[in-house]
């Protein structure tokens, strides 16, 4: 997208505009603007739920606008009550600073901080909130907010009605976020704030503050909060949050998360999370409706997002790892990769002595690990071609498995039939 007059239509067809101030479309069509989104530094990594706002900023930058990523080093010390049912644990300044570094590295694949004409900016609201005196804040900001106005906001009302209520610390968050918008408007002529639909009240508070304090007009846009087809929170799996940090969620697990997208979600997710064009997505949608069993749209989604976040090499490794589950080669895979792939299959720990001298007979190995009920069953399976060691078919019932057969001398993968796996790990 290079023509800024079209960016509103681009966001609209992708389903990204849940609500916006009335003049936003005309503003975006009038020439380059500055827009910001806030990111919460409560962890050293963003998660997949952050991808939608990141992509929105990146789309604006590609359309010629200035994208500002505001990381809440100041407000992160307090916590936003929006969408929360209880007050969060407060972070130390050291924890927030460490988290900021991790977040910056995850924004860089999406936002061009070195563009010649409209470089993206990353700012920390602690730079101004940390210097703001209480008396100055109450005089210059607090006077524009009535308690009635703040109590009317859904995020505040929900917390007041909850068992734990809301602390004064969190109650002031709306004013602090509004002040961020005012400060960015002063510093960078930023006229647009974007966020999830739960941020609408805070965004409007900011536009009101800019109007009252500066006599200028601010604008807002919110995108839908993403859920999956089952109605549960996007980015949560049985094993927990899906992070962008490869040390927290491996590229293989990340790839699998997208590959396992519900059929009802795959087309919307292609619109939200990829750079694919309307024509390309329409073609995938047609193919998906004609033959959903091929899961072509799912595969493309997993490829596109994994490469965006982790790069081409990590995508290639993730696809190689995925093929292992269907009998693919273990070549170039490390023990770490295989443990990740097979973390939910039964495992047995053995000592190096078991493989010393002449190794361990494959029939004994199958029976001892419980892959088969007996040596007799193992013998019948070998004769019928149904036993595999590291995805290599064993054709000799007298075959012996030696220490050198273990990957990095640490791990062995047994398989019975097509998908019945068992992990053998060397005792540490």
Image: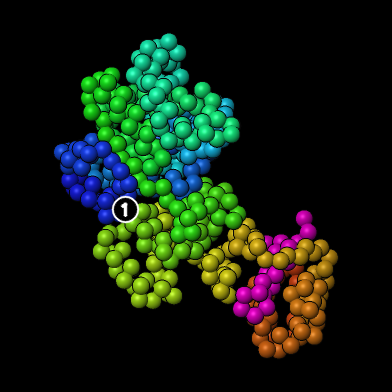
Asked if residue 355 lies left or right of residue 217, the reply is right
177 or 258, which lies in front?
A: 177
Asked if residue 368 lies left or right of residue 151, the reply is right
Quarter occupied by residue 212: top left
Above or below residue 142? Residue 254 is below
Residue 318 shows in the view? no
259 in the magenta segment? no
Above or below residue 305? Residue 394 is below
Outermost residue to the top: 135
Residue indicated by mark 1: 15
Quarter occupied by residue 416: bottom right
Q: Residue at x 52, y 48 (%)?
A: 243
- Residue 258: x percent and y percent? 47, 60
- From which residue to which does the magenta span run? 408-428
422 in the magenta segment? yes
- Residue 339: x percent and y percent? 64, 60
Dot 1: element:
loop
Residue 186 shows in the view? yes
Give the number of marks: 1
- Residue 360: x percent and y percent? 80, 74
Quarter occupied by residue 50: top left
Above or below residue 130? Residue 53 is below
342 or 194, which lies in front?
A: 194
């Amino acid at each position: 997208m290079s023509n800024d007059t079209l960016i509103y239509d681009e966001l609209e067809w992708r389903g990204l505009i849940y609500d916006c101030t009335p003049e936003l479309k005309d503003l975006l069509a009038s020439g380059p603007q500055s827009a910001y989104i806030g990111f919460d530094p409560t962890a050293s990594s963003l998660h997949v739920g952050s991808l939608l706002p990141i992509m929105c900023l990146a789309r604006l930058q590609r359309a010629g606008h200035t994208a500002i990523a505001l990381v809440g080093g100041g407000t992160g010390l307090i916590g936003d009550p929006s969408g929360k049912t209880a007050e969060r644990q407060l972070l130390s300044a050291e924890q927030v600073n460490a988290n900021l570094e991790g977040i910056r590295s995850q924004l860089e694949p999406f936002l061009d901080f070195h563009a010649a004409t409209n470089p993206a900016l990353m700012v920390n609201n602690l730079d101004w909130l940390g210097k703001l005196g209480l008396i100055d804040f109450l005089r210059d900001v607090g006077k524009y907010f009535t308690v009635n106005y703040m109590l009317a906001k859904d995020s505040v009302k929900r917390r007041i009605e909850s068992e734990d209520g809301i602390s004064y610390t969190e109650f002031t968050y709306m004013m602090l976020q509004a002040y961020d918008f005012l400060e960015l408007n002063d510093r960078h002529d930023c006229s647009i704030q974007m966020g999830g639909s739960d941020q609408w009240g805070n965004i409007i508070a900011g536009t009101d503050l800019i109007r009252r304090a500066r006599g200028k007009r601010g604008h807002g846009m919110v995108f839908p909060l993403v859920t999956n087809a089952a109605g549960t929170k996007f980015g949560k799996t049985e094993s927990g949050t899906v992070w962008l940090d490869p040390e927290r969620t491996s590229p293989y697990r990340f790839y699998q998360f997208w590959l396992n997208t519900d059929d009802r979600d795959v087309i919307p997710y292609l619109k939200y999370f990829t750079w694919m064009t309307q024509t390309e997505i329409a073609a995938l949608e047609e193919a998906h409706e004609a033959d959903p069993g091929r899961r072509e749209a799912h595969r493309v989604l997993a490829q596109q997002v994994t490469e965006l976040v982790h790069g081409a090499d990590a995508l290639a490794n993730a696809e190689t790892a995925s093929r292992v589950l269907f009998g693919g080669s273990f070549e170039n895979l490390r023990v770490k990769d295989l443990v990740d792939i097979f973390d939910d299959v039964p495992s047995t720990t053995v000592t190096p002595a078991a493989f010393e001298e002449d190794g361990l007979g494959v029939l004994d190995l199958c029976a001892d690990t419980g892959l088969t009920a007996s040596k007799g069953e193992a013998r019948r399976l070998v004769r019928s071609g149904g036993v595999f060691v590291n995805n290599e078919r064993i054709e000799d019932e007298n075959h012996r498995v030696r220490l050198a057969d273990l990957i990095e001398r640490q791990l062995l993968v047994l398989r019975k039939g097509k998908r019945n796996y068992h992990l053998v790990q060397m005792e540490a």
